[in-house]
Image (cartoon, grey):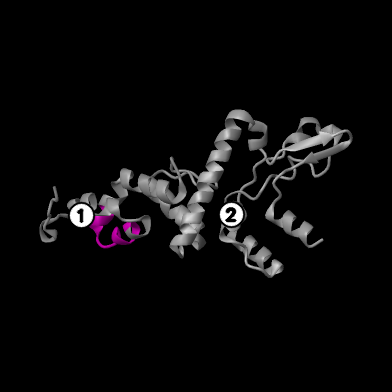
Amino acid sequence: TIRVVRISAMSGVDWWEHVFPHLDGHHCALYSMVCRTWRGIAEGDSATWRARCKDDFDMEESILPTGARYPTFRLAWLAARKEYKEFFRSDEDSVVFNRACKMWKTIKAWLAANAPDILDTIAPGISAEDLAALEARLQLPIPTSVRAIYRLHNGQDEAKVPNDFAFEMRGRNWLGLLGGYSFYDHVINCRMLSAQRGLALAQG
């Protein structure tokens, strides 16, 4: 059954209930600025903004990947969109970024349940400005997938995971996110390098 609704007969509340849930977050934000009535409805609609946070950033709560907490999903979406705006200039980039969000969420959930010590070593994301500076030094474009991964979490904190095996570090020698192994006196700890460290090693 198709329900036909006359647009001229729809109130601001009707518009939001029937139309806005089908829009992406960007257009919800734009249309909420049309008038005070729509803005008031938008600010109070937690369900729609919760869905937009989930769709764009895989956020179940109004907490950004940076750890910043916001009182509403609308404010969280606006803040996240501003923080990661470079990934929303094309549909392809936004899809890649959402996949990176899902990937990190899965990894961190597993670590929280099985290896909390490794979870504690995961570093905050690199800033867009610092990543752009590294790209300029590299003189090559960094793929969107790699940019998304490092913008969310810039590898592991070097202060918590040793570069080389050290007896005094004890169990921290084995906190590499990517695993590790030992063979007699040959020890490998496969940690996730920061973007800065990776570039420094690549350039010798």
Foreground: 100 or 36? 100
Residue 140 is a magenta residue: no
Query: Residue 82's x, y, as percent?
Result: 47, 58
Provide the residue span drawn in magenta. 28-40
Asked if residue 60 lies left or right of residue 125, the reply is left
- Pointer 1 local density, CA inside 10 Å: few below 14, some 14–19, many at least 20: some
The quarter in which the C terminus is drawn is: bottom right
**Marks 2 and 1, how far apart at CA:** 36 Å
Label whose residue precedes the other's in the sequence (2 or 1): 1
Residue at 57% in and 50% down: 152
On screen, residue 143 versus residue 90, left or right, reads right
Question: Is label 2 in contact with label 1 (beta carbons under 8 Å)?
Answer: no
Q: Which amino acid lies under the numbered mark 1 shown in the image of this protein?
A: Trp
Quadrant housing residue 180: top right
Residue 151 has which mark? 2
Tell me if residue 204 comes above or below residue 52 in the rendering: below
Res. 67 in view: no
Could you tell me which secondary element the residue under label 2 belongs to? Answer: helix
Check disc 1 and report its element: helix, strand or loop.
Answer: helix
Q: Position of residue 100 (x, y in %)?
A: 53, 50
Regarding residue 27, the answer to whether it shows in the image is: yes
Instruction: Name the residue tied to disc 1.
Output: 15
Please indicate whether residue 102 sits to the left or right of residue 196 in the image. left
Where residue 128 sits: x, y (%)? Answer: 58, 60
How many numbered marks have been drawn onto this rendered protein structure?
A: 2
Q: Is residue 35 magenta?
A: yes
Residue at horizontal 54 percent and vertical 39 percent from the top: 106
Q: Amino acid at mark 2?
A: Arg
